[in-house]
């Protein structure tokens, strides 16, 4: 979350409490970000450390910059609402939840945070409802984290459940490591995208990640382009060289083949 009194980053800091200076929203603005996903497990760190609920301020900042959001909000009802967008005849529905926790990250009836996945029942039902109304549901999860390219058995179970409910894309946004992907029936599933603007210099496997570019046409998801990146100077992404990309994707596709076994 953005916090007006967020301290300047300390390179020697070894803790896991995070916030962002409001000025850093210029990064998202410069990228042309229109939709922000809020499933993260650190969204209420400011409240935990400084006893200040920074989520309303963060949402106001997004609103000021013309950005929309989903999977988080000022209470649980707000967090569970899908974001509905119609563009060039395509009806898109963004929805997501946090299964990992911790408890302080989850929204409640009277406090802000991420939408809890609970038993995945509510989000599966909502995906089915949205699909019946002609929307293309795009589902993202803050799932349990690990540092393996392969997909966890529980993630396979839960991601496929939402795919079977009618999602066209299911992504794991939690992963610091790019993970296996698959086509499950007619759904594209990526179990983890890897880091984008996040530094973990002690783990080389976290340097590489994927940016997805999806194409929709006449109410269908018709293609996905994988842009492969690696981090330099701590947290600055650049496109991989052809050699880096080949090695990276070979590892991803090998892990993906295991899903068929």
Image (spheres, grey):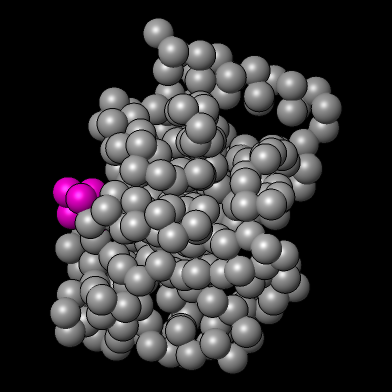
Residue found 43% across the figure and 53% down from its top = 131
Residue found 39% across the figure and 27% down from its top = 151
Where on the picture, by quarter, is residue 123? bottom left
Residue 227 lies, in percent from the top left, at 72, 41
| Residue nearer the viewer, 226 or 4 | 226
Residue 33 lies, in percent from the top left, at 66, 69
Q: Is residue 260 above or below residue 48?
A: above
Residue found 23% across the figure and 49% down from its top = 120
Magenta stretch: dominant secondary structure: loop
**What range of the chain is rendered magenta?**
117-121
| Residue nearer the viewer, 134 or 113 | 134
Q: In this view, does 174 lie above or below 84?
A: above
Q: In which quarter of the image is the N terminus?
A: bottom left
Residue 156 lies, in percent from the top left, at 34, 30
Where on the picture, by quarter, is residue 118? bottom left
Left or right of 127 on screen, residue 30? right
Left or right of 163 on screen, residue 231? right
Is residue 22 located in the magenta-colored stretch of the structure?
A: no
Left or right of 23 on screen, residue 82? left
């Amino acid at each position: 979350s953005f916090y007006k009194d967020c301290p300047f980053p300390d390179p020697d800091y070894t803790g896991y409490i995070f916030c962002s200076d409001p000025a850093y929203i210029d990064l998202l603005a410069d990228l042309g970000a229109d939709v922000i996903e809020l499933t993260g497990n650190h969204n209420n760190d400011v409240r935990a450390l400084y006893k200040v609920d920074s989520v309303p301020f963060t949402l106001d900042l997004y609103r000021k910059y013309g950005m929309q959001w989903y999977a988080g909000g000022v209470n649980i009802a707000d967090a569970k609402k899908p974001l509905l967008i119609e563009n060039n005849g395509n009806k898109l529905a963004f929805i997501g939840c946090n299964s990992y926790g911790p408890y302080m990250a989850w929204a409640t009836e009277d406090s802000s945070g991420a939408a809890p996945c609970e038993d995945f029942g509510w989000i599966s039902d909502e995906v089915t409802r949205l699909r019946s109304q002609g929307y293309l549901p795009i589902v993202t999860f803050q799932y349990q984290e690990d540092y393996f390219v392969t997909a966890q058995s529980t993630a396979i179970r839960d991601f496929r459940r939402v795919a079977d409910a009618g999602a066209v894309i299911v992504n794991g946004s939690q992963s610091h490591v790019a993970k296996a992907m698959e086509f499950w029936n007619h759904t594209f599933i990526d179990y983890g995208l890897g880091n984008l603007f996040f530094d973990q210099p002690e783990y080389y496997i976290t340097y590489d990640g994927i940016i997805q570019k999806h194409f929709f046409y006449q109410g269908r998801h018709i293609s996905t382009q994988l842009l492969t990146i690696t981090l330099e100077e701590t947290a600055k992404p650049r496109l991989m060289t052809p050699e880096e990309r080949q090695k990276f994707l070979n590892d991803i596709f090998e892990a993906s083949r295991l899903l068929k076994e």
